[in-house]
Amino acid sequence: MTRINEHYLKLQGSYLFSTIAKKVAAYKIAHPDKEVISLGIGDVSQPLVPAVIEALHAASNEMGQADTFRGYGPEQGYAFLREAILQGDYLSRHIDLQADEIFVSDGAKSDVANFQELFAADCKIALQNPVYPVYLDTNVMAGRTGEFVQGAYQGIIYLPCTEENHFVPQLPKEHADIIYLCSPNNPTGTAMTREELKKWVDYAKEHNSVILYDSAYEAFISQENVPHSIYEIPGAKEVAVEFRSFSKTAGFTGLRCAYTVVPKSVQVETAAGSKQSLHALWLRRQTTKFNGVPYVVQRAAQAVYTEQGRAQTQAVIKGYMQNARVILSALQQAGLTAFGGENAPYIWLKTPKGVDSWTFFDKLLTEAQVVGTPGVGFGSCGEGFFRLTAFNTPQRTQQAAKRVAQLVF
């Protein structure tokens, strides 16, 4: 009899957002007359900006001509996009990287999920609690987390992010081989300052650790003391891998394009103690398992870095952040405490005393027809909290906010 990978059996329940989708679908079937507004899953609502559409059309036309048609592209991404990323996101911020340290992919989620393949099964993992589920679940699948006992995996170092520590993870007292950090953070909406992030870089250098840094929401940063890249911190190029996405920055959730930066200076060890380049390992993995992002999508991503593209995408981002302010105002009117919404399109609200996350979800759905995400779905420290997103349209966001403000708690 063929055996399965039994680590999959350690996963807790179904994927968070599929559970939410099922509950919402059941409610809609039972109440077809009710209009449900989603502030739950972080999908965008605004269309692609004109500069991106123009680039898509032009690239599509190229694919219809024999002399400009393209088949398989380079697994690491076309040079035109990697150079645009390098200049637009790094050299312009005085961060010294090289274009061949950038790997274009079909999504930050898949990159974060796949990157753990490069590490030994006994590597010690540290991650924030609450946390985006893919960080934890992919390590469960790989067998690094141990057994799930009394609400926690025994092999994981949890970094509590609570109201008391302003949702900023504190350094672990023990050694961690791999550290997952997300800033601006999903789900809490908070962001680490340069001083706070420097502590993590210093820890990683001292412990020979690797930081897997998810900065998918850097375009939403508004505060000067919050870095847009971990490589703004001295020494980070020796210890950190950075994941970026066009999904929220430019509305590419339906196109799928992202990139990962793996500096050549990040070194890892074999069991015998010899040094190996993490860059070389990721390149080998990608060339084996990945055939690259479509040419037309990469041309669309390149357009994000043009003068018009930047202005147009920034206007959309400003609209989403205005949505965040509308939601925050409504929560305050309802007498609720909320965080985030300043450097990220997420609002992290505190549920009323005695109301757990899923009970709050049900109340919001049944009484206001508004969908959010129970905080406990992101980890035990998310219990008693609830995530709302600012990605709906201004009109529907205002409708949802009005409904929430009228709730009685």
Image (cartoon, grey):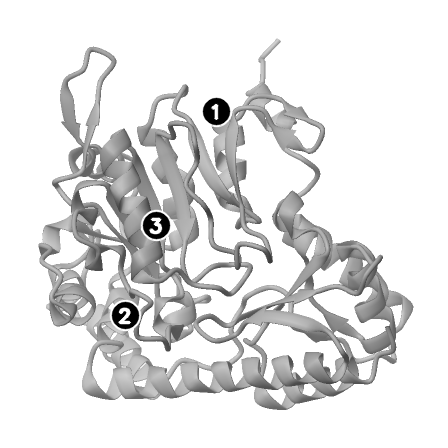
Q: What element carries label 1?
A: loop
Which residue lies at the image location 9% right of the left edge and 58% below the top edge?
A: 96
Determine crowd level at label 3: few under 14, some 14-19, many 20+ residues with C-alpha closer than 10 A: many
Instruction: Between label 3 and label 2, give the one nearer the viewer.
Output: 3
User: Which sits in the foreground, 340 or 372?
Assistant: 340
Q: Which residue is label 2 attached to?
A: 301
Q: Is mark 2 on a helix, strand or loop?
A: helix
Q: Which residue is label 1 attached to?
A: 144
Give the amino acid type for the residue marked by disc 1 in the picture: Arg
> How far is mark 2 from mark 1, CA to CA?
35 Å
Q: Earlier in the sequence, mark 2 or mark 1?
A: 1
How far from the left and from the top, in percent, is residue 73?
A: 19, 53
User: Which sits in the foreground, 62 or 271?
Assistant: 271
Say how many tags the image has.
3
Which residue lies at the image location 74% right of the left edge and 87% below the top edge?
A: 402
Question: Are the residues at dot 3 and dot 1 in contact (C-beta closer than 8 Å)?
Answer: no
Q: Which residue is label 3 attached to?
A: 213
Which residue lies at the image location 58% right of the left edge and 79% below the top edge?
A: 392
Q: Is mark 3 on a helix, strand or loop?
A: strand
Instruction: Between label 2 and label 1, give the one nearer the viewer.
Output: 1
Q: Is residue 105 visible?
A: no
Give the amino acid type for the residue marked by disc 3 in the picture: Tyr
Q: In terms of image quadrants, where is residue 232?
A: bottom left
How far from the left and from the top, in percent, is residue 332?
A: 69, 81
User: Which sits in the foreground, 305 or 73?
Assistant: 305
Would you place residue 328 above or below residue 245 in this image?
Answer: below
